[in-house]
Image (cartoon, rainbow, N blue to C red):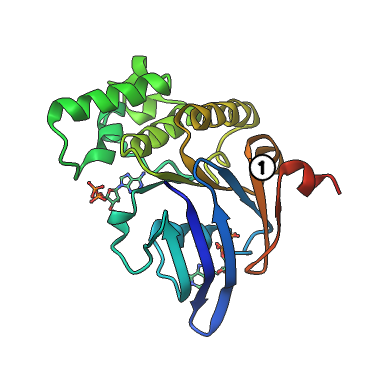
Amino acid sequence: MATITLRNLVKSYGKTDVIHGINLEVADGEFVVFVGPSGCGKSTTLRMIAGLEEVSGGEILIGDRVVNELDPKTRNIAMVFQNYAIYPHLTVRQNIAFGLYTSTLSKEQKAAKVSEAGAMLGLEPLLDRRPSDLSGGQRQRVAIGRAMVRDPAAFLFDEPLSNLDAQLRAQMRIEIKALHQRLGTTIAYVTHDQVEAMTMADRIVVMRDGHILQSGAPMEIYDN
Ligand code: ADP
Ligand code: ADP
């Protein structure tokens, strides 16, 4: 069960609180999109869930386990970033396999996972190419592949499409949504793009100044 629960979650930088005690329950398999103006705390929230930032107060639970005191590696969560974070000197195959860098799987099992992710993401013909040969959308798929091979209980996406042009964004929206439907994995997704939120979310969480202003189905959020 990969529910994500935030209980009274607080983040401060020095004396400044940027997250003011938020509460949220993301259901197993739910696709939750965080929206809100720049600086409202979306990315900080995601980074705390990933364990890239320490929490200043409150708790984060994955399933029924409080994880914020644990090593981030034990969280079984994979994050996909806006800037791809892929390695130019490695091939597509090697970049995807990098997600399994510290895995204890056998070489064959790793290769099988990389092939499976490559097939699911339509990267098969590109596995031996380098990122410089790829389009932005293909690179973003490599970054997703690297997260996928880890079999995470949840995916965290931080503005994954904002570097892409409009046409690719439209295509990737459909692909990420399809991937979610196929894998059924819990997803927390940050964007400032209303279309992304509307078309992808099971539920939209609207943040403002470090608070959750509103949370509901896309129709409820944008209908009024
Ligand atoms: P969003 O993702 O919604 O644009 P962020 O989570 O990036 O917002 O930032 C929330 C607030 O925290 C902002 O006011 C930002 O300036 C502040 N902040 C983020 N990272 C740091 C940091 N490392 N040090 C100090 N303040 C930070
Ligand atoms: P294991 O899951 O076998 O314990 P680790 O958690 O030790 O593997 O691997 C951790 C490293 O893998 C992290 O420090 C992180 O930099 C890297 N990594 C590669 N891809 C991702 C991803 N998509 N999300 C999170 N960490 C990733």
**In percent of the image, x 35 and y 26: which residue is there?**
117
Q: Residue furthest top?
A: 125
Residue 164 horizontal side relative to residue 197, left or right:
left
Q: Residues within 10 Å of mark 1 (few under 14, many from 20)?
A: many
Mark 1, residue position: 197
Q: In this picture, is 21 found above or below 5?
A: below
Left or right: 100, with 185 as reference point: left
Residue farthest right in this picture: 224
Q: On the image, which quarter does residue 206 sit in? A: bottom right
Q: Secondary structure at mark 1?
A: helix
Name the residue located 42 percent from the left edge and 23 percent from the top edge: 121
Would residue 72 appear left or right of 209 to someone viewing this image? left
In the image, residue 153 sits, relative to residue 96, either above or below, namely below
Three-letter code, disc 1 = Ala
Residue 148 place in picture, x, y as percent: 37, 35
What percent of the width, then of the height, locates residue 156? 47, 47
Task: Residue 153: name its quadrant.
Answer: top left
x, y percentage for residue 95?
29, 34
* Residue 48, picture quadrant: bottom left
Q: Quadrant of ligand 1?
A: bottom right
Between 86 and 27, the residue placed more toward the observer is 27
User: Does 50 sit above or below residue 129?
Assistant: below
Looking at the picture, tell me which residue is in the foreground, 23 or 50: 23
Mark 1 CB near ligand 1 (8 Å cut):
no
Q: Please, which residue is most extreme toward the bottom here?
A: 15
Count how many numbered circles sit on residues in the image. Answer: 1
3 is higher (above) or lower (below) than 22? above
Whole-percent x, y for residue 185 in the image: 46, 38
The residue sitting at 56% across, 31% down in the picture is 177
In the image, what residue occupies the spot 52% across and 63% down?
6
